[in-house]
Image (cartoon, rainbow, N blue to C red):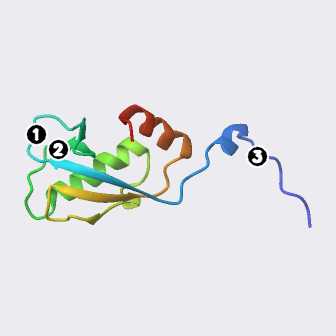
Amino acid sequence: MPTPPPDPNPRSAEKKTTKAFLLAVQVQPRAAREEIVGLHAGRLKIALHAPPVEGAANVALCAFLAREFHVAKGEVAVIKGEKARTKTVRITGATDDLLHRFRQRWGL
């Protein structure tokens, strides 16, 4: 059996991905801007445009975090607190490097 050709992208070895991690968040719906506000009571406070109606804020939260972690929307899921402002979110597929920089930036 022939050996596979070398990887044309030498940086691909740096792109290790995490299996999954949990993120505790506090959502501020109906905000003027979508942004990470900072830490609030040990949770990452995230401001979103969407109202807290019929899951709109949950969808917006997942889309926002998918952009922040450069993963597909399907890789982000609210696993606790679907009808509350305090939520636990599972994110899969983010690179270890990005996760490390995110934790350093926000003190997690």
- Identify the residue under disc 2: 48
98, above or below 23, in the image: above
Quadrant position of the N terminus in the picture: bottom right
Q: Which residue is located at x 8 percent, y 44 percent?
A: 30
Q: Residues within 10 Å of mark 2 (few under 14, many from 20)?
A: many
- For the image, the number of numbered tags is 3
- State the image coordinates of residue 6 (x, y, percent, origin top left): 82, 47
Callout 2: SS: loop
* Pointer 3 residue: 7
Q: Amino acid at mark 1?
A: Ala
Kindly state the secondary structure of the residue where label 3 is placed. Answer: loop
Along the line of sight, the residue nearer the viewer: 69 or 85: 85
Q: Which residue is mark 1?
A: 31
Which residue is at 83% across, 56% downward?
4
Q: Is residue 105 left or right of residue 100?
A: left
Viewer-side label of 2, 3: 2
Assign the C terminus to one quadrant of the image: top left
Give the residue furthest to the right: 1
What's the CA distance linking mark 3 and mark 1? 45 Å
Asked whether, in this view, residue 91 is left or right of residue 16, the answer is left
- At mark 1, the secondary structure is loop
- Contact flag, marks 2 and 1 (Cβ < 8 Å): yes
Residue 84: percent from left, percent from top? 14, 61
What's the CA distance linking mark 2 and mark 1?
5 Å
- In the displayed structure, 54 sits above or below 50; it is below
Q: Earlier in the sequence, mark 2 or mark 1?
A: 1
Which amino acid is tagged 2? Leu
Q: CA distance from mark 2 to mark 3?
A: 40 Å
Quadrant hosting residue 88: bottom left
